Amino acid sequence: MIGVLLPILSSSRLRASGVRYRRQFSAFNAYFLDSIKGIREILLYNAGENREREVNRRSDLLLEETEKMRYTTTRAGAATELTVSAVILAVLAVGIGLVLSGGLTVGRMILGVVAVFGSFGPVIAISALPGNLTQTFASGDRVLNLLEETPAVAPITDGKRFSFTNLSIKDLSFSYNGKDKILDHISMQLQKGEIIGIVGRSGCGKSTLLKLLLRFWEKESGDIAYNGVTIDEIDTASLLSNVTMVSQSTYLFDETIEENLRIAKPDASEEEIVRACKAASVHDFILTLPDGYHSRVGMLGDNLSAGERQRIGLARAFLRGSGLILLDEPTSNVDSINEGMILQSLKKQKQHCAIILVSHRESTMAIADRIYRIEEGKIYEQCRD
Ligand SMILES: Nc1ncnc2c1ncn2[C@@H]1O[C@H](COP(=O)(O)OP(=O)(O)O)[C@@H](O)[C@H]1O
Ligand SMILES: [Mg+2]
């Protein structure tokens, strides 16, 4: 009864309450951390009180869920205790009955009752297991669900390797949901030493095109070929070492500037790092920092402007030494001085690589050799005037 029946009866209820508790717990944690990260916005908009109220509300929900879980585990424990007491009382009653009817001596009866009493210890531990493990199972479920997630595109580990010289896109079509075509029969060529500009209104599919070039999504039809090799046959590691993307805002880890740059090339020498930073017009700025290249990004906090971050991001991409650099609106968050510096750096860098520069601003396009416009899924080469 105690080792098998009760655990089976209580486990489903315990499990459900453990899952609910864990879900509430992680929702609360996420909200609380998010509030800390966004504390500046909260202060600026004087939204502290509302935020606090919501934190308290969620905290109460969590407390409620905690109480429910405790109630369920305690009830399962109480059921065990109750069963033990009832069985012992029943054995005692039967024993007394047998002694009275002369079927058992008093000594044997006491021995029997004590033996039954003593035998519960180990099984009580088993019966307590579902209660003790509720949270463990719920946490385990969450980790397993995460591990079971399949990526949208499987990496290719035994594909062909290449060293970028040219890119050819032919009749490329793509949609996220299989219905609404984001890109519709797009064709384009690019060689080392060229800068191509891509313009188009927000949401027309510029970023999508860059993601397809990195195979973050699988193309629907048509072809993307590097040096004549179709992207679906290229080793993912080789692809990522040949193609580097710089996005709208550069994420810098809370480490030194040098360590942040080294992500692109862990074994880079000091000279290589300095060369990349000079090429990205950020070397002189880094030298003005208290510890130069050894300054910690976290300590600098707001002292790094968006433009400086972007230039560090650019240096990181240059250090990588890829043959093709994709830039997704690299200057949309920066002032015109920084934009000028970034565009100038790109222009100088193009002798070493090919560049695809995406922007919804036409002013950025001054350095491009050719400009394409994406409109309703189609691509048009644009004449300069
Ligand atoms: N992961 C996604 N799932 C579904 N739709 C998406 C996804 N990413 C982007 N989209 C949609 O695809 C269209 C093109 O997006 P995007 O390439 O980011 O545009 P752009 O960079 O030109 O502003 C938009 O309508 C956008 O909402
Ligand atoms: Mg975009």
Image (tube, grey):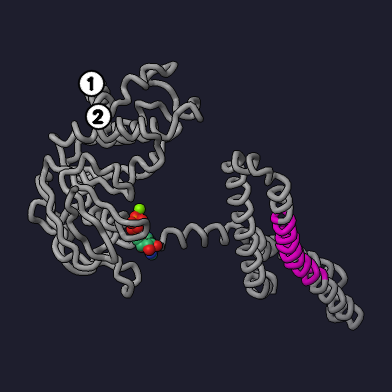
| In front of the other: 128 or 252 | 252
Where does the N terminus fall, quadrant-wise? bottom right
Residue 279 appears at what percent x and percent y?
Answer: 24, 27
Residue 85: where, in percent of width, then height? 82, 69
Left or right: 60 with respect to 287?
right
Q: Is residue 73 visible?
A: yes
Task: Please check the rendered image and state whether residue 60 is part of the magenta-colored stretch, yes or no.
Answer: yes
Residue 104 image point, x, y percent: 84, 77
Which quadrant of the figure has residue 366? top left
Q: CA distance from mark 1 to mark 2?
A: 12 Å
Check disc 2: other Cα within 10 Å, few if <14, some if 14-19, many if 20+. Answer: few
Tell me the magenta residue range: 58-85
Q: Amino acid at mark 2?
A: Asp
Give the residue drawn at x 15%, y 39%.
353
Q: Which residue is depicted at the point 65% across and 44% down?
A: 45
Viewer-nearest of discs 1 and 2: 1
- Can residue 151 be seen from the camera position used here? no
Give the residue number, with chain letter if any, for mark 2: 267
Residue 73 circle label = none
Using a 10 Å C-alpha cutoff, classify the residue at mark 1 as few (fewer than 14 neighbours), some (14 to 19) or many (20 or more).
few
Please tell me whether the stretch drawn in magenta is mainly helix, strand or loop: helix
User: Which quarter holds ligand 1?
Assistant: bottom left
Which residue is the site of mark 1?
271
The three-letter code of the residue at mark 1 reads Glu
Give the SS element for disc 1: helix
Residue at image coords 73%, 64%? 68
